[in-house]
Structure formats: structure tokens, C-alpha cells
């Protein structure tokens, strides 16, 4: 089977070269036979890589520990669910996954692109082939998942226990789907540049793809936060770790693009900017993949140890060089059709929204790379989570404010009556909210500002829904619930966007809540207890009952039992665990891992970690944390995704024609 | 004033404040990041270099780990081949911590020559890669 995999990779190499050559020449010369051949190469490449994926899964399920990748990533007692996910839990496998999914997306693009956008496809297939080729070459020459060992171990090393979590089965592929799918709009952008067809057409062709990758990235990031929270046991969900930042960067840039593209569609402005954003998002997606797969941030020196790092950096340098050249030579074709008329206008609000999104991305990038940058000029200095928060809290709140302003302010030039009509009620809501929480005794500056701005934004969203529904009620005589539903269904992009904004507001409020986190560590004998005051003024008491130890499927578990009471009333039992995973022969593998016990409600989470047990006794060391408003992170994330799905949802038959006609009219207007 | 100029001023304000935030943020909470060798060199050239917040990235010296669960104290040494420093840490070490991993120790080097750690991060091998076999 490893032979089949190897063979598939070599065939993929040839197909990739062929598809790239025929695609570029076919696009340049207009020869349809070459174009057709390139298109077929993408399909063939996809089929070949799927064969390689199949071969690797086969080896994993057959427990062929002679294959290095299999021996390094699974063991015979690993549950089937996780054996499957070993495909992307290691470097080599994840690169295969990348390439295979990319060509699958490429094939979808070949099949589903509307006839009037087909002119871009030869270049698109060529770009897809080049990117896939990069991964295939890296696998073949630096990180082959099918390499065999000179001997056969009795059992594999097993999967890192931290990856043995449902969140980890779905989080990496979602994030990868996000990273990978950016390549398709990127390929269209390159196609537009190369063919010099830089009108609004290519933007229309990639609309669904950009929302799709944004959606995958959003889901991936949320699942990553959830996994970090329930599995890593450090008590939070976001630590500004380089790997987290790597996923956040393309998300920010894609978000900026999804907004600024509306300005180009409506007003023919920001053409250079939009193209630049797509190119940047793609570079960041490759960079993100690279960052997750190398230790470059921890130490520049570790970077040369892995040949994969060198492959990635050469590829990135070459790509940036070529893209820069392509971009600069096409700049004259990207003249804006309108200019900014007033600072108080929707165009301006969107421009600043983009500025903040890209600004946040730049600061996160610089801070993430700061250890490397500072090491080049002197002592290595690394920013910590407080540094990131210090920079991004004000920028984030400014951005949130624009979330409320942008959708409501008038195009071109907002008049005073317009501003009054749109913002009187929401601003009042925000101010009242701030006063209420001040009266309730909250004194921390940033959380107060966050909540006030959040309420302002919610005010704008509520006002939009109310006005829209009332208009339908008056015009069509629809009942309010019906009017509300039709409002969303008929203007998916606009109202889906508002739903996304609602989710974002929830996330901001939840982040502000983390400012009130409290925690304590205690070493408790059975019967002893410790108390912790929650930010809501309650007193929680945690009483340690005892320690139990038992064997589970592939691990030995040590569990502490804690009875929790709030203001003296018992509310439940929590059982945090310490797990020692073992292989099929009963030998310990990896280090002990932590399974925190979490009790969640709308207001706050109780988060208990078992640190360890004093040898031979039932004395346990715990960390007790109260995390306010964590629930809102997960549900805010779900609402963001739900809103994204609404924006993306294919138009139905009734509303569909109207929406399509609307788009056509807009496009006509800008040309 | 022309709209373009106003806009440019707005952009400049945002960019400058972002830059200021970054510079201040790094000054306030950024940390030196040393290997033991670099730290010993720094201490040699700057004798007053104690009680400064820093991170030290190094290997845990095998066999040096002493755990006292009752007081949740962890003592170990870190080294990089050039220099070695003892470390004291009160708290829960991460799951991935053993006497053979690479760690990042966050804390302050005191006059007693011991790094008093406020946090110990075990390096998650190239994001949860298995350690290469011998």
C-alpha cells in the first residue's frame, strides 16, 4: 500500500507539472485543447491524491507500523474515530490532506463556475496545479508519509492524548479547509491579473468561495478555542499563541475583503486594495500552514533543522516575488471609478473598517514575529498575551464601533438628519447600558466601554430588523414573524451580515467577561474545602471528597471528586481527571494529560483542574477557576457561523431571480 | 480641507496609534527571551541584570526534576549545552512537562543564581508532532 501511495505521489507530480504548463499556455494562447487538458489534469490530480489518501488511511487502519508515519501517530489500541483523524494529525499526512482537498476544491471550481466566468479557468487550473505541486514536491523530497522504517515496531507511539478529543477531530480539517479554500479565490485573482480581465467579473465569480473560506476559518477558529478550553486545561480559550494567530490572520484579511468588496461592487472603488487583500490572504494561509508545522517562532534555529521549513520559505518568497511583479505591472488597469466624497459616509466607514481589520492583522503579525525580528537586531524579546491584549483591545473596540456605523450611514455623504434618524436610538441604548452597569458597580474601563459599544451595535441591528419588518408589514400586509422571515430570506447578504454582527457582539462581550476571571490553587486532604468569590458576588465552596483510580480503554485515569456549593447550597459534583495514556502493551505513552471538569451556565463557568495527587495519599492539588461568560463565546461563534451560512445559502427559486437581477443591475451600474 | 486630506489624516491617526500601542505594549509587557548561554553572557556584560522579567528557552536537564506535590513546588535545571540554571516554580506544571522536554520558563533570575519561575511552558513539539524516533 505504501508503494501505491508513493506511486500516486509521483504521478501527481507529473500531472501537476502538466496541468500548470497547459493551463498557463492555454490561457495565454487561447488554445482550447490545452485548456481542456489542464482542466482534466486537475480532475486527474484530485483522483490521484485521493488514491494516496486512501492508501494512507489503509495503512493506518491496517496498523502497518513499518510505515514511519503510522508508527509515529497511532497505536493499536487507539479508538477508530481517532485513527481516521491521524491522516491530518502529523506533518506529512496533513500536507497530503492539503493537496488532496485543494484539488477537490479545484475540481469543484472547474465544474461549478458559471459559463460567463469560464475565461478565467485555464489560469485557475494552472494555479491550483502549481500550489498542489508544491505540496507534492515537499512530500516526495522532504516529508513523505509513505516512508518505511528499517524495522517494524511492535506497536505505534500512539496519538498525542491532547489530540484525542472530538474537537481535535474536526478543528484541524475545518481550519485547513479554510486555508485551502482561499487558494480558489486567489487563483481567480491571479487569473484576472494574468488575463488582464480586471473588471468586477472575477469578484462575482469568487463571491461564494470567499464566504466559504471565511466560514471554514470561523468554524475552525471557534473549534480551536473550544478544544483549547476543554482539553488543554489552562483555563482559557485564547492565548495569542503563534499557531492561533496564524489562523486569525487570514480570517481578519478575509473579513476585510468581504466588506471592501461591497464598495467595489457599489462604487467601483478599492480595486487595488481588494486584489491586494486576496493575494495577502492566500500568502497568510500558506504562512499559517507553515507556522503550524514548524517551530520557527520558538526559535529561528529550529527552523533550519526541518527541510520542510526551507521548502515553505522558498515557496513563499518565490510566490511573493511573482505576485508582487504581477500586481505592480497591472496597477494601471485598476483605476478607481469614483472618489471619496465625504469622511462621514458609508464608503469612509468601510474604509476605516478595513483599516482596522488590516491594522489588527498587521499588529498581530508583527507581534507574532517579534521574537524573530528582535533577535535579528539584538536581544530576543517576545510579546506576551498582555501585550497582544493591550494593542488589540482598543483597536477591536474601534472596529466594533464601526460595525454599528457602517451598515447604517448613508452612501457618498451623510446628512445630519440621516445621522439623527439612524443613530439616535442606538447611541441612547449604548449610553443607557453604560450607566446601568456603572450603577451596578462595575468600574473596569475597557469592559464598560466594550459593553456600551456592544449595546450600541445591537441597537443598530435591532433597529434595522424592526424597520425592515415593519416596511414589509405595511407594504405586503405580512404578519410580523412572516415579514421578519422574508426580510432575511430576500436580502440574505445584508441580514445574514447583521446576524454575523450579532454573533461578533456576543463574542466581544464574552471577551470582556474574561477580565473578571478569578482563580485559586489549593492542596486539599479529603474533606477539606476552599472558597472562591465569583464576580457576581456569590461564594463558591469546593470540597474535596477523595481520589479514585481506574483503567479505561487506552488510559489509566486518576480522578478527584469535588462537591461544589454556591452560598452554602450544594449545586453538584465535579470530577476532573488526570490521564496516563498507554499503548496496546500497557506501557505508558506520552505525558499525563489533564481533563478539566467544567460546569457551564449563561453567567459563568466553573473550571476545575486536577493538578496531581500526593503519592500514596488522597491529598489532591487542584486549580479552581471561575470564567465569566464563556458560554457566550461558543454561542456567539455559532451565531457568526449561522449568519455566514445565511449569506452563503444559494438563492431559492422565488427570491433567487430577484437577487440575481439585483446583482446584475449593480454590476451594470459599475461598468 | 479636501476629503482626501481629511481621510489621510484619519488613516495617519489610526496607523500612529496602532504603532504607539505596539511600542508601548512591548515595552510594558514584552519579555526578553534567552537561551541559558545568552543569559549568562548578558549577566556577564551587565552585572545588574537581576530581577528582570524574561523567558528562558532550554532543555530540562534529565534527572534534575524534583516534584513536591504537597506544596506544588517544582525544581529542575535547564541547560542548552553552554550554560545551566536551576529553576524553582510554584504551581501546576503543564501536562507535557517531563525531564526530557524543551521548556520555556517565564520568570526572573535572582541574585541567588536561581530562576524563580512564574510560569513553565513545555514546548508542544512542532504542534503535537511525535518525537522523532532514535
Image (spheres, rainbow, N blue to C red):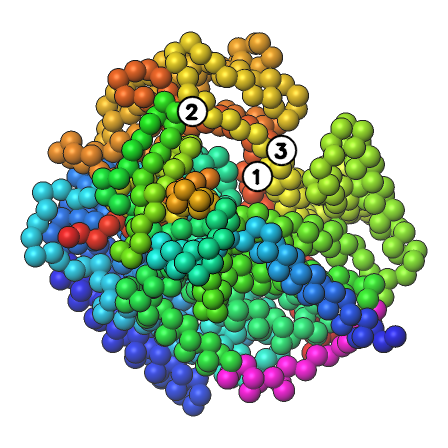
- The answer to whether residue B66 shows anywhere in this view is yes
Q: Residue at x 28, y 64 (%)?
A: A305
Q: Earlier in the sequence, mark 3 or mark 1?
A: 3
Look at the numbered disc 1 and give the secondary structure of its residue. Answer: helix
Is A258 displayed left or right of B112 in the figure? right
Find disc 2 in the rendering and name its residue.
A622
Is A349 displayed left or right of B35 in the figure? right
Is A502 displayed left or right of B117 in the figure? right
Q: Residue at x 20, y 34 (%)?
A: A588
Relative image position of residue B14 (x, y in whole percent): 71, 63
Q: Are circles 3 and 1 on residues that touch, CB within 8 Å?
A: no
Find disc 3 in the rendering and name its residue.
A516
The residue positioned farthest toward the left in the image shown? A151
> What subunit carries mark 1?
A
Q: Which mark is residue A633?
A: 1
Q: How many marks?
A: 3
> What subunit carries mark 3?
A
Q: Residue at x 18, y 64 (%)?
A: A6
Q: Is disc 2 surrounded by few (<14), some (14 to 19) or many (20+) residues within 10 Å?
A: many
Relative image position of residue B31 (x, y in whole percent): 51, 53
Give the extent of the magenta segment: A325-342
- A5 or A590: nearer the viewer: A590
Is A255 displayed left or right of A25 in the figure? right
Amino acid at each position: 500500500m505504501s508503494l501505491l501511495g508513493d506511486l500516486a505521489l509521483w504521478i501527481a507530480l507529473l500531472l501537476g507539472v502538466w496541468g500548470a504548463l497547459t493551463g498557463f499556455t492555454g490561457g495565454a494562447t487561447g488554445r482550447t485543447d490545452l485548456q481542456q487538458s489542464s482542466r482534466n489534469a486537475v480532475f486527474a490530480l484530485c483522483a490521484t491524491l485521493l488514491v494516496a489518501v486512501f492508501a494512507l488511511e489503509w495503512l493506518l487502519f491496517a496498523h502497518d507500523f513499518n510505515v514511519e508515519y503510522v508508527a509515529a501517530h497511532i497505536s493499536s489500541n487507539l479508538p477508530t474515530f481517532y485513527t481516521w483523524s491521524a491522516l491530518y494529525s502529523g506533518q506529512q499526512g496533513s500536507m497530503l490532506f492539503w493537496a488532496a482537498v485543494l484539488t477537490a476544491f479545484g475540481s469543484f471550481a472547474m465544474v461549478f463556475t458559471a459559463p460567463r466566468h469560464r475565461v478565467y479557468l485555464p489560469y485557475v487550473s494552472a494555479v491550483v496545479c502549481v500550489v498542489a505541486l508544491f505540496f507534492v514536491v515537499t512530500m516526495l523530497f522532504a516529508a513523505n508519509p509513505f516512508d518505511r522504517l528499517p524495522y517494524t515496531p511492535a506497536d505505534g507511539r500512539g496519538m498525542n492524548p491532547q489530540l484525542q478529543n472530538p474537537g481535535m477531530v474536526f478543528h484541524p480539517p475545518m481550519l485547513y479547509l479554510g486555508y485551502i479554500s482561499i487558494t480558489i479565490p486567489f487563483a481567480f485573482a491571479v487569473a484576472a491579473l494574468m488575463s488582464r480581465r480586471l473588471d468586477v467579473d472575477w469578484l462575482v465569480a469568487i463571491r461564494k468561495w470567499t464566504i466559504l473560506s471565511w466560514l471554514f476559518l470561523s468554524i475552525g477558529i471557534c473549534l480551536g478555542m473550544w478544544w483549547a478550553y476543554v482539553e488543554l486545561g489552562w483555563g482559557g480559550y485564547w492565548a495569542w499563541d503563534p499557531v492561533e494567530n496564524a489562523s486569525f490572520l487570514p480570517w481578519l484579511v478575509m473579513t476585510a475583503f468581504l466588506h471592501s468588496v461591497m464598495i467595489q461592487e457599489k462604487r467601483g472603488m478599492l480595486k487595488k486594495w481588494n486584489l491586494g487583500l486576496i493575494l495577502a490572504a492566500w500568502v497568510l494561509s500558506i504562512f499559517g500552514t507553515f507556522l503550524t508545522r514548524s517551530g520557527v517562532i520558538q526559535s529561528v534555529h529550529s527552523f533550519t533543522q526541518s527541510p520542510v521549513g526551507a521548502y515553505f520559505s522558498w515557496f513563499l518568497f518565490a510566490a511573493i516575488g511573482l505576485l508582487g511583479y504581477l500586481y505592480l505591472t497591472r496597477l494601471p488597469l485598476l483605476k478607481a471609478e469614483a472618489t471619496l466624497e465625504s469622511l462621514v459616509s458609508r464608503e469612509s466607514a468601510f474604509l476605516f473598517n478595513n483599516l482596522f481589520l488590516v491594522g489588527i492583522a498587521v499588529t498581530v503579525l508583527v507581534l507574532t514575529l517579534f521574537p524573530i525580528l528582535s533577535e535579528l537586531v539584538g536581544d530576543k524579546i517576545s510579546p506576551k498575551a498582555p501585550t497582544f491584549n493591550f494593542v488589540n483591545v482598543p483597536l477591536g473596540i474601534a472596529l466594533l464601533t464601526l460595525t454599528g456605523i457602517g451598515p447604517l450611514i448613508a452612501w457618498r455623504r451623510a446628512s445630519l438628519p440621516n445621522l439623527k434618524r439612524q443613530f439616535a436610538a442606538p447611541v441612547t441604548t449604548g449610553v443607557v447600558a453604560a450607566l446601568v452597569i456603572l450603577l451596578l458597580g462595575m468600574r473596569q474601563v475597557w469592559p464598560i466601554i466594550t459593553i456600551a459599544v456592544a449595546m450600541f451595535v445591537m441597537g443598530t441591528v435591532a433597529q434595522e430588523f424592526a424597520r425592515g419588518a415593519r416596511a414589509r408589514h405595511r407594504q405586503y400586509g405580512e404578519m410580523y414573524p412572516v415579514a421578519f422571515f422574508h426580510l432575511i430570506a430576500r436580502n440574505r447578504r445584508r441580514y445574514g451580515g447583521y446576524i454575523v454582527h450579532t454573533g461578533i457582539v456576543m463574542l466581544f462581550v464574552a471577551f470582556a467577561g474574561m477580565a473578571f476571571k478569578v482563580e485559586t490553587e489549593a492542596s486539599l486532604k479529603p474533606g477539606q474545602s476552599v472558597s472562591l468569590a465569583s464576580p457576581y458576588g456569590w461564594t463558591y465552596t469546593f470540597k474535596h471528597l477523595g481520589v479514585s483510580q481506574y483503567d479505561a480503554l487506552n488510559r489509566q485515569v486518576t480522578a478527584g471528586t469535588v462537591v461544589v456549593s454556591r452560598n452554602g447550597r450544594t449545586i453538584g459534583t465535579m470530577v476532573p481527571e488526570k490521564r496516563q495514556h498507554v499503548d496496546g502493551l500497557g506501557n505508558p505513552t506520552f505525558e499525563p494529560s489533564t481533563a478539566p471538569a467544567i460546569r457551564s451556565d449563561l453567567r459563568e463557568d466553573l473550571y476545575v483542574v486536577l493538578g496531581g495527587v500526593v503519592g500514596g495519599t488522597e491529598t489532591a492539588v487542584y486549580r479552581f477557576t471561575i470564567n465569566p461568560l464563556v458560554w457566550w463565546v461558543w454561542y456567539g461563534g455559532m451565531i457568526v457561523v449561522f449568519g455566514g451560512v445565511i449569506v452563503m445559502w444559494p438563492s431559492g427559486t422565488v427570491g433567487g431571480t430577484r437577487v440575481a437581477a439585483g446583482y446584475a443591475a449593480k454590476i451594470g451600474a459599475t461598468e | 480641507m479636501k476629503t482626501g486630506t481629511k481621510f489621510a489624516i484619519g488613516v495617519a491617526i489610526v496607523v500612529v496609534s496602532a504603532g504607539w500601542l505596539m511600542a508601548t505594549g512591548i515595552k510594558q509587557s514584552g519579555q526578553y527571551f534567552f537561551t541559558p548561554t545568552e543569559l549568562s553572557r548578558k549577566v556577564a556584560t551587565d552585572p545588574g541584570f537581576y530581577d528582570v522579567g524574561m523567558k528562558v528557552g532550554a532543555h530540562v536537564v534529565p534527572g534534575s526534576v524534583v516534584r513536591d506535590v504537597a506544596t506544588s513546588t517544582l525544581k529542575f535545571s535547564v541547560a542548552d549545552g553552554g550554560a545551566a540554571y536551576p529553576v524553582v516554580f510554584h504551581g501546576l506544571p503543564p501536562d507535557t512537562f517531563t525531564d526530557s522536554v524543551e521548556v520555556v520558563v517565564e520568570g526572573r533570575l535572582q541574585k541567588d543564581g536561581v530562576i524563580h519561575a512564574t510560569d513553565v511552558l513545555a514546548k508542544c513539539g512542532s504542534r503535537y508532532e511525535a518525537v522523532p524516533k532514535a
